[in-house]
Amino acid sequence: MIKTDILIIGAGPVGLFTVFEAGLLKLRCHLIDALAQPGGQCSEIYPKKPIYDIPGLPEVLAGDLTKNLLEQCKQFEPGFTLGERAENITKVKDGSFVVTTNKGTKHNAPVIAIAGGLGSFEPRKPTLENLERFEDKGINYLIKDPEIYRNKKVIIAGGGDSALDWTIYLANINANVTLIHRRNEFRGALDSVEKVKDLKNKNKIRLITPAEITKIEGNEKLEKVTINNDGNIEVIDTEFLIPLFGLSPKLGPISDWGLDIEKNAIKVDTFDYQTNIPGIFAVGDINTYPGKLKLILCGFHETTLMCQSAYKIIHPGKKSIFKYTTVSGITGFDGSRKEAPKAVVKSIND
């Protein structure tokens, strides 16, 4: 059983910022995410997409925003359960909650913060006969450990940032990579497109467009993939097929937790973004209320207020004293401390 103060479901930007805001109140956090790495959509779908509306950052790539948030919150030592989906929730005698994942991992906390973005993400799968037979036997939808593809024959299918980024990465660790896309044009960052074309020109990868996979074959594991290359049929020997067609958002098992749901979003009270179940909050794109805007910066605001109410639940009767970090500085759980500049403190006190 993993015990924590606030159990955060969703390790996207809002979930990661929750760790920081909770840490300022000396509250510990643990995060659950179905994806293999933190960052949510920012890491998985569009890591190189520029974001322009984060205060103080005129422009930041989605992947870099994730890295910055991880750096910001690491002093508060969050725990992670990645590659697992929050499945069931029960309330125990002391009023806290136990959340169990699809792999049986149990977590216990007095406060739940659902920061699941648009919901749990499931990979969009190609329509191919025998697909399930080869899943985890050559067909993977997420790359958890790139090293297993070193010096292997790999086919990547897709035309977005994930497909381009992983093609570049795997080519650089000596994988035999073929990238297949149904169009000649790609949806990813121009810089990545240029890098992929450069790898093709240097014969470091094979690029086949426009083409679609029509058949997969093998005995115990995947062995061959048949493609239709603009009318030309070709069979390619391979050890791995990685379809990267994006992720499909679904509210998933959370929809069965007894929460008030409206149009696939969780209704909350704007006082502190608590749901109809005391102790369970919803912040970020997964919640809804009058005037809701699905923006990362709105999620940052919501989770800041949520943490104040969470403190009162975790420490009933104990008053939290709000302090500006410019005055109080920041002390991590490991004892590390960032002092506020003395000139700023003196100015504010004056």
Image (cartoon, rainbow, N blue to C red):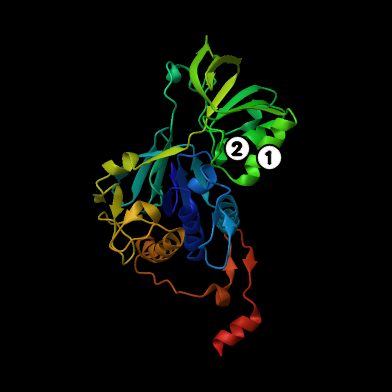
Relative depth, front residue between 3 and 307: 307
The residue at the far bottom in this view is 350
Q: Pointer 2 and pointer 1: residues touching (CB < 8 Å)?
A: yes
- Mark 2 — residue? 164
- Where's residue 93, x and y in %? 28, 48
The residue at the far right in this view is 202
Residue at 48 percent of width and 22 percent of height: 135
233 to the left or right of 322: right
Residue 265 is labelled as: none
The residue at the far top in this view is 219
Q: In this view, does 257 lie above or below 330?
A: above
119 to the left or right of 13: left
- Mark 1 — residue? 195
The local secondary structure at tag 1 comes to: helix
- Where's residue 247, x and y in %? 45, 38
In the rendered image, the quadrant that contains the C terminus is: bottom right
Relative depth, front residue between 319 and 264: 264
- Where's residue 268, x and y in %? 29, 58
Q: Is residue 174 above or below residue 290?
A: above
Q: Earlier in the sequence, mark 2 or mark 1?
A: 2
186 to the left or right of 199: left
Can see residue 228? yes
The local secondary structure at tag 2 comes to: helix
Amino acid type at circle 2 is Leu
Q: In this view, does 237 lie above or below 75?
A: above
Relative depth, front residue between 237 and 4: 237
- Where's residue 74, x and y in %? 58, 55
In the rendered image, the quadrant that contains the N terminus is: top left
Can see residue 28? no
